[in-house]
Each structure stands twice: as C-alpha cells, then as structure tokens.
Image (cartoon, grey):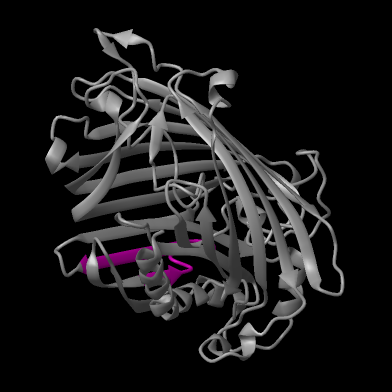
Amino acid sequence: MQLYKSVVMIYCVFFSIDSVAQSEAIHSVISNDPEYVTASKTAVSHRPDTEVVVETELVAEIKPQSEQQNTAEKPSAVTPAEKALSPEFVAVPIVFSTETLSTTFGAAGVVKHAGQPQAVALGIGLYSANDSWLSYAGFYHYQLPQLDQWLFSAELFRGHYEQGIYYLPNSDLYQPKSNDTSRVISVGDEGFNRLTMEYVLPIARGKHGAENALGKITTPISWNPLESGVSSISLTPFSKYRELEALAYLADEARGVELAVNWDNRDAKLNSTEGGQTNLTITKGFSVDDNPSWLMWEFEQSAFMSFGSNRWFEQQVLGANIYLADTPSWDKHHNQQLQRPPSFAGVSLGGFERLRGYSSKQFTGRSAVNYALEYRVTPQWQPLQSLPVFNLYNIPWWQWVLFAEAGNVTNEFELTALHDDMKTNYGAGIRFEVEGIVIRTDFVAGGDESQFWVMVNQAF
C-alpha cells in the first residue's frame, strides 16, 4: 500500500490549499461583483510516483437579467459596467513536495475580467529541487464582436521531469499484439497547445447568447435539449509532445483537431443532484514526420438522481458515468505503417478520473470502456467551518462518497472482449467546497496496490 505516497500527497495539497483557495476566491461563486458571478476549478495535483498534473476548468457564471437590474438600483461609486470590466489580479505562492519532484516552489496568478467581463486568465509556474519544472497559461471564454454564440479559449503547457514515471504499451517495444504496459523511469519533456472554438447552440439556456449560458441555472431540469441545459459544438486544434530520454525512438509528437458535441444538463457543476451530461469527442490526428494519421472517438454519459434528505443527510445523490472509446484506424495501414496514435495521445484508463485504483494512463490501447457509480451524501453535521484554518474560508458543504468502478482496455473494439476480465476497484472519499473549489480526496483499493488521490473537481 502506498502509505508514504499518500501522506506526501495529503501534505502537498493541504500545505498549498491556502494558495489555491486564494487564487480561486477572486472568481468564486460568492463574488463581490453584483452582475457577474464566476466559478472556477483549478488544480496543481500530484500523481503517485509521477509528474505534476495541471487540471483546469474555468466557468464564468452570469446572473439573470432581472437580478442585474435589481442590483443596479443600489447606489455605487462605480457604475456596474465599469466594475464588471475592471480586471482583478491575484498572485499566490505554491509549495509542496513529492517523491519524484522533491521540494517544489512556484506561484499562480489569476486575472478575473481579463479584458472582457466573462473572461479569465490563469498562469502557473513551478520549479523543483531536482531541476524539474512546469509552466501553464490559460485564457478562457473570450468573445469576438458580433459572435454572441461563440466562446474562445487557449491553453499552453510545458513541463520537464528529471525522474518521470511512465507506463508504455509493449506494442511500442517488443510485442506488437499485446496491450500490456511496462513501467519506465526516464527524463521526460511534455507539453501541449490547445485553441478551443466553442459554439453555443441558440436553444434552451443558450438562446440568449453564450455569455448568458454561463450563468446559474434558474429553470427546471428536463431531458429535452430544446428546453434544458446548454448544448454546444466545439472545434479544438491541438499539438502535444512527449520526449523520453530513455526511449528516444518512440513517437514524440501528436497534432490534430478535436470535434466535440456536448449537452450539459446538470443542475449544478460543482455538486450535481439531477440531470446529466452527454459528450461525444472525435479526434483526428494528423500525419507527423513518418507517423501516419489516426482517428479516435470518445463518448461519455453521466446521470444524477437525488434521494432527498433525512435526519442524518441533507442530501443523497446517486451518480453514474459511462465512458466508451475506440480508435477506428487502429488496424489500418498507410505506407505500410499502422495508423495508431502515440500512447500519450490515445485511449487510456487509470488515474484520478477513470479506474482510480491504478496509476495514470497505466492501460493504453485501441478501445476502452469504464463504468463508475458513486453514492454521495451531504451530512447534516458540518463541523469544518468551526475548525482552525478551515474557519478562514467559506465552506458551504462537505460530502461523503462511496464508489465503485469497472473498466478495461483492449486492442479490438468488441463488446465481449471489452467486458472480459475487467479491472475493478472500489473506494471511499471526502469532498468539500472551499471558496468555490471542490477538493476531492479518494482512497481506492482493488488495483495493483491501493491509491490515494487528492484532486480538485468531481470525478464526473
């Protein structure tokens, strides 16, 4: 059991929770701006035995027009329009320690209303005692004149790891037909660039423009996309690279474009109790150097059901998630080469999102299926707000969770093969919202060895 690593990770997150919470507070659900309410979810998390992961999801939420008019009636030295457009900046330090990175120092900076009322900019820089480093910059939810239904976002990441731990498929090494993986320690360089162009369909919550679709949900949830939720289509050109010193002959670059169709019909992004989310992503990888093009698709469906409250629990929710992915070009040839993506850009399971009992991207191959079920309860008893350190922050709720998962990766897209000899894991966790951030702690058993994840955001 990875007890030592678990202790290290708890230390990492809670030692730097002050930094994370402060950077998030400027675009919290509880905002000082009467017109604009912004929620964000950002993490610098730590995988057991491996590199730092940057996970970011920023969501600008705008209050309905009626609420804006009511707040505009209040006297103010600054007009609402001027206040909404005035940028707010916060920079905070980050300090943590892991087995592979050693002691790491850095900082994060966030700009709210970064040039536009709904826009957010984020920057993170870290450097470790063993000369590893990473940098991240993100610019989210920008709009162009006359394009009210569009949102534009861009991300840039660069990282260097002196002792990176990677799971590589044996098909990249000695056994072309095997989907087993080998654990490799190597000096590694990674990075990606992404530009997302999202079109919000003018239906349901998107009928008044993309900016208003970012607002809080004020209408009842239904399963008709013409009446409920936010439907969108996005196009994301990307480039990724991963260069490993120990295995320099492997494909080290992937370029392509993602086409995603999404229907977000949840009643809340941080703590969903009803509705669900449907997402289909088709990825076309371009030919790079001598490596051929490839094609991959991913489908994900989540659903939530509330069981109400009782004397013990303020809220009880059952959440379910299904993930299915395939690489149709897997067995096709171009110039006598198989049209397969590099393992770091293709289908995978393992990590803090799917099949959490295993290490990140431990299983890679052509196809994957994963099922997750979570029982989330919010106790009536909430002592956190009165505890030292915790009482410095707004913590509206905490949550106890039991969950189970089953998944598999195969080198053929066949339902019987995908469901044969599936990997399973089960676990328990505690989650709580701190200044608009969901802190997720999951202890998982059932894999090769127990895993403990400390992460930001719900698993789904």
Per the picture, the main secondary structure of the magenta-coloured stretch is strand
Residue stretch in magenta? 109-127
Q: Nearer the viewer, residue 216 or 9?
A: 9
Of the pair 371 and 253, the residue shown nearer to us: 371
How many numbered markers are drawn?
0
Residue 233: where, in percent of width, then height? Answer: 57, 36
Please report the residue visible at 24 percent of the width from the left and 47 percent of the height from the top.
190
Position of 401 with respect to 104 (left or right) is: right
| Above or below 318: residue 263 | above
Q: Can residue 380 be found in the magenta stretch?
A: no
Residue at (76, 57) in percent of width and height: 317
- Residue 454: x percent and y percent? 46, 64
| Image: 330 above or below 427 | above
169 shown above or below 373: above
The one nearer the camera, 65 or 161, is 161
Q: Quadrant of residue 123?
A: bottom left
118 relative to 35, above or below: above
Q: Position of residue 446 (x, y in %)?
A: 52, 48
Q: Quadrant of the N terminus?
A: bottom left
Residue 153 can be seen in this image: yes
Left or right side of 352 for 63: right
Residue 435 relative to residue 12: left or right: right
Q: Residue at x 17, y 41 (%)?
A: 244
**Point 35% across, 30% down: residue:** 180
Residue 431 lies, in percent from the top left, at 59, 67
* Residue 265 visible in the snapshot: no
Q: Seen from this angle, which residue lies furthest front?
A: 1
